[in-house]
Image (cartoon, grey):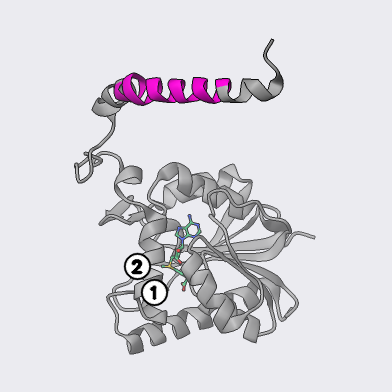
Amino acid sequence: MITDFQKQPLLANTNMYLLDYFSTWHILTIFVLLLPITPLPGAQVDTSNNPVMSFNVNRYWDTRHKTSTTLQSGGDKGLSEEENKAFYFIRIGRLLEIIRAIHGENHHLSILDAGCGKGLFTNALRQCGYHVVGIDSSPTAIEYALEEFGGEFLVEDLTSYRHYQLFDVVICIDVLFHLVDDEQWRHAFCNLASACKSSGSFIFTDSLEQERREQGDYIVHRSREDYEQLIAGNGLRLRDFSGYKFGCNLNGFAVVTSVVWGEK
Ligand SMILES: C[S@@+](CC[C@H](N)C(=O)[O-])C[C@H]1O[C@@H](n2cnc3c(N)ncnc32)[C@H](O)[C@@H]1O
């Protein structure tokens, strides 16, 4: 009769035997079977027809936030530091005008800055008294914003974002046209639209041209019609569009509200 104590070496031997067996035939077989589908180190995978695979948006932005100056990070990398400063000032001023035109002088508005980058718009709006939460998918950008400004900054991907509160205003400055995958662009838009109160407004930027326009690896401008379809599908209405009018930049602020917005 074998006691429990005596069984242990026996089991240990069996395990050793199994391990030996696996380490020779099974591991070799698995390796040979996986060979055709596993890219070898350094091998090129042709992803030219798949923009999602060929371009990793999150990696691009996190690296850009790590390696660029504060203003070029989320601003226009083709502009100098001084030019970017002017670019930010102009947009912040215009954004404030738009928010005041819609919501009056109410400084207690809650605002979601979606794709806030290093938090420059978030901070400017907070300075004006608004309660602003900043979210971005780049951990580097959020770490910077937390260190520099504090307050509520969260690492969140707009495509999977689930709001935990409704906001009076949702802003999304120069982000949507960087979502090159159409499904992800749609998801992000719907997530943000649903984070607005029914009396609220969604202010995003793009160029809203007649035709869809792709620019390099990481920019897809959807047409005005594409946006209007998405906006109507969310039970919303495009109220206004005003271009930045900064150099040759074609982008501008699009203001979306609920269809019955402003009706008493
Ligand atoms: C051009 S920058 C604009 C940053 C900021 N709005 C500003 O104007 O300073 C675009 C930002 O979108 C963020 N972003 C890109 N895709 C995102 C996604 N799926 N979810 C959240 N943020 C995203 C990037 O990390 C980057 O900070």
Is residue 13 on the magenta stretch?
yes
- Tell me the kind of residue under disc 1: Ser
Residue depicted at 39% across the width and 63% down the height: 61
Residue 27 point in image, percent of width and height: 34, 25
- Label placed on residue 37: none
Q: Secondary structure at mark 2?
A: loop
Residue depicted at 59% across the width and 82% down the height: 149
Residue 249 point in image, percent of width and height: 33, 71
Q: Secondary structure at mark 1?
A: helix
Residue depicted at 66% across the width and 77% down the height: 151
Q: CA distance from mark 2 to mark 1?
A: 19 Å
Q: Is residue 26 visible?
A: yes
The segment highlighted magenta reads: 10-28
Which quarter of the figure is the C terminus placed in? bottom right
Residue 48 position (above or below residue 242)? above
**Cβ of disc 1 within 8 Å of ligand 1?**
yes
Residue depicted at 60% across the width and 55% down the height: 192
Residue pointed to by mark 2: 250
Residue pointed to by mark 1: 73
Q: Nearer the viewer, mark 2 or mark 1?
A: 1
Magenta span: chief secondary structure = helix
